[in-house]
Amino acid sequence: RTPSTPIARGAFIVIEGLDRSGKTTQGKLLADALYSSGHNVRQTRFPDRTTPIGQMISTYLTSSSSTTLSDQAIHLLFSANRWEAAPSILSSLQQGTTIICDRYTHSGAIYSAAKHNPALPFHWAWSPDVGLPAPDLVVFLDVSPENAAKRGGFGDERYETREMQEWVRSFFVTMAAFGEEDGDMVIVPAGKEISDVANVVLDKVLPKVEVVEKSGSEVG
Ligand code: DGP
Ligand code: NA
Ligand code: NA
């Protein structure tokens, strides 16, 4: 869809949350709503399991047994999976397409830091992602780990344990409170009806998209 006024660049919006927090559903509803109001929109997600690196990640996540991949090695694969997509993300943004991205660098650092491996502290976890296109806004869909665990499919993959999810949630809340290294973050309570959550998400995101599309600031 071609907007009536030329836009300087698209906005880079990231949807984050615990496993089974409704990210995929909300990302789709958000993209549809933005499209309906005349914005060029593209959805992306990480990990992108379709690439060779993504397939290695998927194998790691779906195997319950221990693996030959160290915490550092899998961490760097997740980061590489973002780096391989970075040129395409940048070019979409520069062509005026707004991106709705399911997980990004916050998941990247937080899921690894939540392992509490002393050889993989938070600052180490964050560093391979430094220099990636920075989001304009990160929306954290906040569900309690208890509610997420009740949703269908929870427990299928490696990180879907109650303890891990509790840690992941506390890291996200901490990052939101401290002001982040990578774009503004808003916390959206996401335990309510799907349509209610979608309305709140759109209220947070739409003004940001409009400002970015008009101002055309550099991608961070
Ligand atoms: P998803 O396909 O959104 O369910 O994500 C798969 C799992 O991988 C989920 O538990 C979150 C986790 N994850 C996503 N990105 C990263 C990352 O960059 N690093 C690590 N360690 N875990 C990640
Ligand atoms: Na998952
Ligand atoms: Na920033």
Image (cartoon, grey):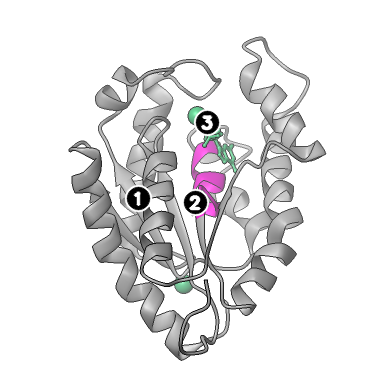
Q: Are marks 2 and 1 in contact (CB under 8 Å)?
A: yes
Image coordinates of residue 87 in percent, x first then y, are 74, 66
Q: Marks 2 and 1, how far apart in space?
A: 10 Å
Ligand 1 lies under 8 Å from the Cβ of mark 3:
yes
Tell me the residue that label 2 is attached to.
106
Secondary structure category for the residue under label 3: loop
Res 136 seen here: yes
Image coordinates of residue 106 in percent, x first then y, are 49, 51
Q: What residue lies at 35% left-to-right and 35% top-to-bottom?
A: 21
7 to 140, vertically: above or below:
below
Tell me the residue that label 1 is attached to.
140
98 to 213, vertically: above or below:
above
The amino acid type found where label 1 is placed reads Phe
Closest to the camera, between mark 2 and mark 1, is: 1
Q: Nearer the viewer, residue 22 or 176?
A: 22
Q: Nearer the viewer, residue 119 or 136?
A: 136
Secondary structure category for the residue under label 1: strand
Which disc is residue 115 wearing? 3
Q: Which residues are magenta?
A: 101-111
